[in-house]
């Protein structure tokens, strides 16, 4: 199970509101607090995604370990303490606030049973959300099923976009350029305290996302505003799902990456393909590019590819034949089928340029908006 724990929210497939899950008594047998409930949730995610290596980022209140006597099994307490020390659990005074802060920046889905009613003025994006929150519920034979939560709208009238932005600005969540919270992720941050490397993207694996205090990214430990350290290199997570095995790849900003049987350079799948699949996957089959915060995929194969995209509620649509040599938007959850049983998907966080309509500056939605890489007719 520990190989499913992410050390950075930036590279996680799901966020887990750990205090909420550990206390959810409808799953995982009796007891006030139990880590077995987390095991069941991760097992449910493996089933849901088909990915045994699916990665979760755990966020917990300090009170979770503070109330250690409520754990049925004291081995859970020792394990949790070790995870906190190893950076596998982010322990904060108010986990709800932090879960929503990170979810708002990354748009990574959240596993929770909480509806966060008290946080809706600050985090207006929760209103009406039907896809970003998954609630664990009892499944057959003691398992757990994850059900999308319809967060509903908690004010009498739907808040118009203008009022929404005004409310955000009032809360200090928009910068002088009316930058939504998620824009924080396009910059790198550094604590002015010399020896503090909590937010330093060059320091290694464990990089915290900034805390927001009065609209400014702030160091959690030193309580001082972080310095802007220049543009943060964007990366996108790509997964190849082939006959039940999942392989992960990371794409860098401004990269153009051919994927196929044996592209050179590019992502070579030949060692993962059986004979039938190898005969149907072209040497260069699709090209995935990450440019200006958008991920695009283009079919360049001999026999064609199919694609299905997820709707606003995260449900997959119908498979469609891809138009050869034309770039398509490739969002988290979308799938591209190179050959039967050979699927490419995107996971992890989205980019500011991919925000849903309510957060955009009013630009019309187009398959490839202006400023993104133009579709080309050559490879
Ligand atoms: Zn610091």
Image (cartoon, grey):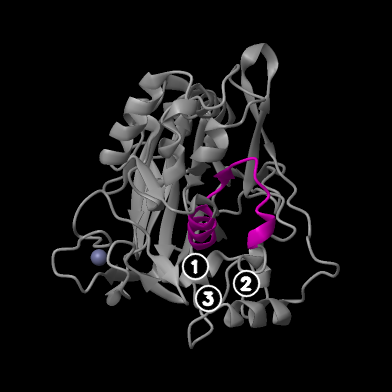
- The residue tagged 1 is 182
Q: Nearer the viewer, mark 1 or mark 3?
A: 3
Q: Residue furthest bottom?
A: 176
- Which mark, residue 173? 3
User: Whereabouts is ligand 1, in terms of quadrant?
Assistant: bottom left
Point 60% across, 17% down: residue: 30
Quadrant housing the C terminus: bottom left
Q: Residue at x 42, y 45 (%)?
A: 62
Mark 1 burial class by Cα count in 10 Å: few <14, some 14-19, many 20+? many
Estimate the spatial distance between the alpha carbons at disc 2 and disc 3, rounded to whole Å.
Answer: 13 Å
Q: Residue furthest left?
A: 195
Neighbourhood count class around disc 2 (C-alpha, 10 Å): few under 14, some 14–19, many 20 upward: some
Q: Which residues are magenta?
A: 97-119
Query: For the point 69% across and 56% down, which residue is it?
Result: 117
> Nearer the N terminus, badge 1 or badge 3?
3
Q: Is residue 228 visible?
A: yes
Q: Are marks 2 and 1 in contact (CB under 8 Å)?
A: yes
Which residue is label 2 attached to?
359
Q: Nearer the viewer, mark 2 or mark 3?
A: 3
Point out the tag, 2 or 1, that comes first from the N-terminus.
Answer: 1
- Tell me how far mark 2 sits from mark 1, CA to CA: 10 Å
């Amino acid at each position: 199970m520990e190989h499913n724990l992410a050390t950075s929210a930036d590279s996680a497939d799901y966020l887990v509101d750990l205090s909420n899950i550990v206390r959810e008594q409808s799953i995982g047998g009796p007891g006030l607090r139990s880590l077995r409930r987390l095991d069941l949730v991760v097992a449910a995610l493996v089933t849901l995604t088909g990915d045994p290596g699916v990665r979760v980022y755990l966020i917990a209140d300090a009170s979770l370990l503070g109330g250690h006597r409520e754990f049925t099994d004291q081995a859970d307490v020792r394990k949790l303490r070790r995870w906190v020390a190893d950076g596998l659990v982010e322990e904060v005074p108010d986990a709800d606030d932090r879960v929503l802060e990170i979810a708002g920046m990354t748009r990574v889905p959240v596993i929770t049973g909480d509806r966060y009613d008290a946080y809706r003025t600050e985090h207006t994006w929760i209103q009406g959300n039907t896809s970003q929150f998954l609630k664990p519920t009892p499944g057959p034979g003691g398992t757990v099923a994850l059900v999308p939560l319809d967060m509903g709208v908690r004010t009498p009238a739907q808040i118009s976009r203008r009022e929404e932005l005004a409310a955000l600005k009032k809360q200090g969540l928009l910068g002088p350029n009316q930058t939504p919270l998620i824009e924080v992720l396009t910059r790198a941050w550094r604590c002015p305290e010399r020896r503090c490397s909590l937010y330093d993207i060059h320091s290694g694996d464990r990089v915290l996302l900034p805390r927001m205090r009065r609209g400014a990214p702030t160091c959690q430990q030193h309580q001082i505003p972080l310095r802007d350290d220049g543009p943060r290199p964007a990366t996108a997570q790509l997964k190849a799902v082939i006959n039940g095995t999942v392989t992960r790849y990371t794409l860098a900003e401004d990269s153009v990456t051919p994927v196929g049987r044996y592209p050179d350079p590019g992502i070579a799948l030949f060692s993962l393909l059986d004979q039938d699949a190898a005969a149907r996957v072209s040497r260069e089959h699709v090209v995935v590019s990450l440019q200006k915060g958008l991920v695009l995929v283009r079919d360049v194969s001999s026999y064609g590819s199919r694609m299905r995209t997820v709707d606003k509620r995260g449900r997959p649509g119908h498979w469609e034949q891809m138009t050869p040599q034309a770039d398509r938007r490739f969002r988290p959850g979308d799938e591209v089928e190179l050959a039967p049983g050979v699927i490419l998907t995107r996971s992890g966080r989205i980019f500011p340029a991919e925000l849903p309509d309510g957060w955009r500056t009013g630009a019309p939605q187009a398959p490839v908006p202006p400023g993104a890489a133009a579709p080309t007719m050559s490879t």
